[in-house]
Every structure is written in structure tokens, then in C-alpha cells.
Amino acid sequence: MPFPIPTSPQQNKMIHQIRLRYPSLPVVLNFQVKIPNKSHSRFLDAAIEPLKLDFEYDGKKNHTTLGAKLKDKARDSELKALGWETFRVTAANWKLFFDGGLLDQIIKMRIRELGIKFA
């Protein structure tokens, strides 16, 4: 049985905002992606699996050091090799994502790229 992944209030708020705008899209909190030929998985903060979109909330505490940024870059590269696109949401760009239309642009562009139809 997998261990529970802790979530932050920001992650919960982010997934709520995505679901409000796109209720027909399956948005999953802490979605597990197994990395082929490796002994580990990646857990995505807010994943839309059919679109292979990953939205990560990066707080100041865990994502501002050089080491953390390098780990994030390596993680994003692994996911990119599997067809996933990762977008990093922070307190500084929150309004751009959710009030400025960036989330809408990302989702609409990905739907067009993949030729997916949703009800």
C-alpha cells in the first residue's frame, strides 16, 4: 500500500482552482507516475493525465535553493521524456495563472496539440 503524500493548503487551493475552471477534466492530486527502468516514481501535485499536464506548487521553503532547483529540473526532465509538461506555480505568479489566463492558455494549447475532445 503506498504511503500517503502530504499536501499543502496551496496545493489544495491550486487543484480547486483548476477544477473550478475545468470541471470535466480529471484533475488528480498527487498523481503517481512510474519512471520506466528506474526504481522510483514521481508524484505530481495536480495532474491532468489525458493532457499529460503537471502543475506543481513551489513554495519558498522547498524550492528556492540551488540544490532544490537542480532536483526540480532533473525531475521535470524525467517527466518530459514521458510526454509530460510541468508548470510551476508560485505565490509570485499565482494571479497570472488563475486570474491572468495563463492556465486557460496552457490547457487550450495542449488540447489542440494532442487533438483531444472533451465533453
Image: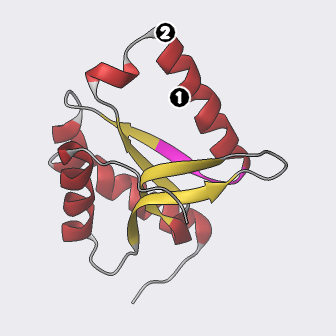
Please state the extent of the stretch shown in magenta in the rendering: 82-86
Of 94 and 111, the residue lying toward us: 94
Q: Quadrant of the C terminus?
A: bottom left
105 lies left or right of 36? left
98 lies left or right of 70? left
Callout 2: few (<14), some (14-19), or many (20+) C-alpha neighbours within 10 Å? few
Disc 2 marks a residue whose amino acid type is Leu
Could you tell me which residue is drawn at 23 percent across and 54 percent down? 12
First in sequence, mark 2 or 1: give its number. 2
**Residue 55, labelled with which disc?**
none
Residue 42's spot in the image, x, y percent?
58, 47
Give the quadrant of residue 47.
bottom left
Of 35 and 110, the residue lying toward us: 35
Residue 94's spot in the image, x, y percent?
20, 38
User: Pointer 1: what residue?
Assistant: 72
Taking 108 as reference, is 14 above or below it? above
**Residue 66, labelled with which disc?**
2
| Principal secondary structure, stretch drawn in magenta | loop
**Residue 57 part of the magenta segment:** no
Q: Quadrant of the N terminus?
A: bottom right
Name, please, the residue furthest toward the bottom: 119
Disc 1 marks a residue whose amino acid type is Asp
Scheme of image coloration: secondary structure
36 lies left or right of 57? right
- Secondary element at image label 2: helix
Callout 1: few (<14), some (14-19), or many (20+) C-alpha neighbours within 10 Å? some
Name, please, the residue furthest toward the right: 37
**Alpha carbons under labels 2 and 1: distance apart:** 10 Å
